[in-house]
Amino acid sequence: MMHYADLFLAWKYFKPKRSAVSVITLISVIGVALGVGVLIVVLAVMTGFSDKMKEKLLDTSSHAQVYPGRGGYMSSPEIVVDAVRKNGGSALPVVASPVLLQRGERFVPKQLIAFEPEGGVDQLKVEDVVDSGKFSLERGEVMISYLTARDLGIQPGDKLLLHSPSRLAGLVKRDKDGKIQLSDKTYLPGEFVVSGTFAFGKYDFDRDIIFLNLEDADELFGLPLGAATGVYVWTKDPFHMDPFLRSLKEDLPFHQVYSWQELNGRLLGVLNVEKNMQFFLLAFIVLVAAFSITNTLITTVIQKTREIGVLKSMGASSGTVMRIFILQGFFVGLIGTVCGIGLGVLVVTYRMAILHALRFVTGQEIFPKEFYVFSELPAHIVVSDVCWIAAISILLCTFGGVVPAFRAAKLDPAGALRYE
């Protein structure tokens, strides 16, 4: 059973007078604090990145998507819409396809999403992210992102051309000898007026997507009016939609139904694996600090050999001596962990100011949104992650004192008192 005397002696040995041991002890505490701080910052950034990615995926897409069983298009998407509404969801028929945007002599590949504006205002929320101009998708109008507008020098009210890749491919053919020649087909691109620009805040989405009216898209791609290549689906809870998907698949046996997790499975899996790997790799920083604690306590045992001999000669048991030195490891872990948590929270709180300072000093963009998708570094501290880090850190540091404690407990009182 632990006594207050054990705690008193452990604390007394923990903060010795100015000596090499006190410096080594301070270094051990700093090592633990840095390890814990780095762990918290990295896991907070990985968690924030994952959460922000999920949020943006749900903001810029649907909770599920339904496609024809054999590909192609749906001539009557109302069948899918009715099935979705029957199961308590909302649906929006869309034409989603690559297009070629032409501005003067420049051609830029884009991804087109076309829908009826009356039905897509609540779900896609384009109206909430208008950057310039206005939200309008009447016949003959198109909406582009601020990135596309900036790159091509386009303003609301300007005109641009959209080409259908499949119809462009039909303008040429090969003869019997394999030579390329013009086909008999004719094709004109669609000319549209830019009604406004949008900014969702997800770089790759803003870079690639343009919005169009569903009827204009059907005409551009040569589809029957009212046809759709797929149906976007929204539910009340995108994180618990398995029962909804099972019921929808039963009602639509000849269609393909995908959840947003399935459509983005590779990305979400990579984020989860990276977070776990970062945790295990960075935990070795704390493990190294635990080894330094072992070295510190071995030095303490050597310096306190005579005092240990006095304690044992006065009746202190081997268990008491072991507890004293194990508690020193515990104190190092506890204080280092508390300081590390404070350091980690401080860095996460002021992360953007730190990034701006680093950018000013180095002259380089530390977090370029072209690579990392978001305009700022996301971070989210999860209490359970902090608790796991704190528990592992304190346990490793406490176990770091076992070997020195065992050595101290095995000292012979008579031999220890003769120690010089």
Image (cartoon, rainbow, N blue to C red):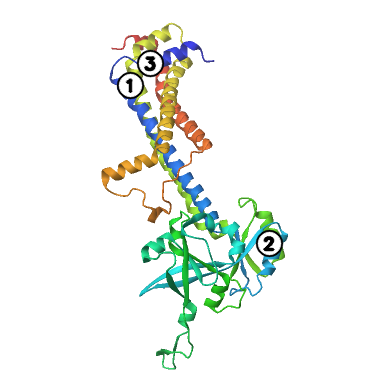
Q: Quadrant of residue 204?
A: bottom left
The residue depicted at 70 percent of the width and 56 percent of the height is: 88
Q: Residues within 10 Å of mark 2 (few under 14, many from 20)?
A: many
The residue depicted at 41 percent of the width and 24 percent of the height is: 332
Secondary structure state at the residue bearing disc 1:
helix
* Mark 2 / mark 3, whichever is N-terminal: 3
Q: Which residue is mark 3?
A: 13
Q: How many marks?
A: 3
Instruction: Report the disc number at residue 299.
Output: 1
Q: Quadrant of residue 31?
A: top left
Residue 274 or residue 59, whichever sits in front? 59
Q: Residues within 10 Å of mark 3 (few under 14, many from 20)?
A: many
Mark whose residue sits in front, 2 or 1:
2
Q: Is residue 417 above or below residue 325?
A: above
Secondary structure state at the residue bearing disc 3:
helix
The amino acid sitting under disc 1 is Thr
Q: Position of residue 284 (x, y in %)?
A: 40, 38
- What whole-number distance in Å separates the C-alpha atoms at marks 2 and 1? 71 Å
The residue depicted at 33 percent of the width and 21 percent of the height is: 299
Q: Which residue is mark 2?
A: 84
Secondary structure state at the residue bearing disc 2:
helix
The amino acid sitting under disc 3 is Tyr
The amino acid sitting under disc 2 is Val
Residue farthest to the bottom? 176
Residue 27 or residue 377, whichever sits in front? 377
